[in-house]
Image (cartoon, rainbow, N blue to C red):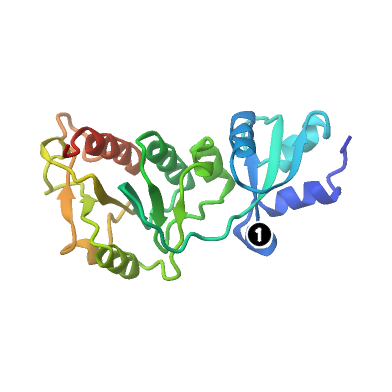
Amino acid sequence: MISSRQHPLVKLCRELHSAKGRKKHGLFLVEGQNSVEQLRRSDFVVRHFLDESSATPEILAYASDAQTATKTLAIAEIPAPIIDFDFEGILLVLDGVGDPGNVGTLLRAADAAGASGVVLTQGSCDVWNPKTVRSAAGSLFSLPIVNLENRSSEAVCAWLHSHEIPIFTAEAHGGVSPYETAFPRRGALVLGNERHGVSPVWEAAAKKLTLPMWGNAESLNVAMAGTLLLYAWRMGEKS
């Protein structure tokens, strides 16, 4: 039974709270029973488990990054990047989305909507951040993360063009309603930074989508908007 904060496994968990620690070890932290069960069923390589049979509640709380108590932790290997892949369906592109909770929620929504994969451009948060992993609620383990060698917005946009993938961007104003759009069965949905929206490089490359607003709200949180757009796409796909 682990009861010391100086135990090597506990110290490793704490290191994995930071991007520097994750990069150093090539590992990431998974918290919570449901996420750990999803991890067990995936192809990810699991290095260690910690639960109430192997560590005290105080140590589990200290090792975790979560605000609420967790009874199960796992440490897994960060997989080798998927540099390129063939896909059908929706590819979700997160262009500088920085909040780990938003990214995790969008991964979960993309998985639920049957997206084929996710690309995160430079400036987006680390997908292996513990908060992202928690917010994704296991979807991170079943949704391909495409990690291009050059993740700049310009490079990702060029990559999509080279694969002849239709591009749609989410805009707060000035776009067409997704509920009046016939979506292709294969395409990319680009969601931008929480404050600044998508990068200018997408301006001439994409069709703009704007969710209609019937109340006084100026816009929606990127995770909420992205979820609605993913489902609108699936409902509006051309047969």
Give the residue drawn at x 37%, y 46%.
116
Residue 121 at x, y percent in the picture: 39, 61
Task: Give the side of residue 165 with respect to residue 10, left or right.
Answer: left
Which of these two is toward me, 219 or 158? 158
Using the image as rendered, state which of residue 177 and residue 188 is in the foreground.
188
Image location (x, y in percent) of residue 192: 31, 53
Image quadrant where residue 155 sits: bottom left
Residue 3, position as x, y percentages in the image: 87, 37
The C terminus lies in quadrant: top left
77 over 113 or under it: above or below: below
Left or right of 5? Residue 136 is: left
Compared with 21, 91 (above or below) is above
Q: Position of residue 95 (x, y in %)?
A: 35, 57
- Residue under the image location 35 percent in, 35 percent down: 113
**In front of the other: 128 or 219:** 128
Name the side, left or right, on which 182 lies relative to 157: left
Dividing the image into 4 quarters, which one contains the N terminus? top right
In the figure, is residue 36 to the left or right of 236? right
Q: Along the line of sight, which residue is nearer the eye, 212 or 179?
A: 179
Splitting the image into 4 quarters, where does residue 110 fall? top left
Which of the 4 image quarters holds residue 84? bottom left
Q: Residue at x 65, y 46 (%)?
A: 29
Q: Amino acid at mark 1?
A: Gly
Badge 1 crowding class, 10 Å Cα cut-off, few under 14, some 14 to 19, many 20 or more, is: some
Q: Which residue is mark 1?
A: 26
48, above or below 162, in the image: above
Q: Secondary structure at mark 1?
A: loop
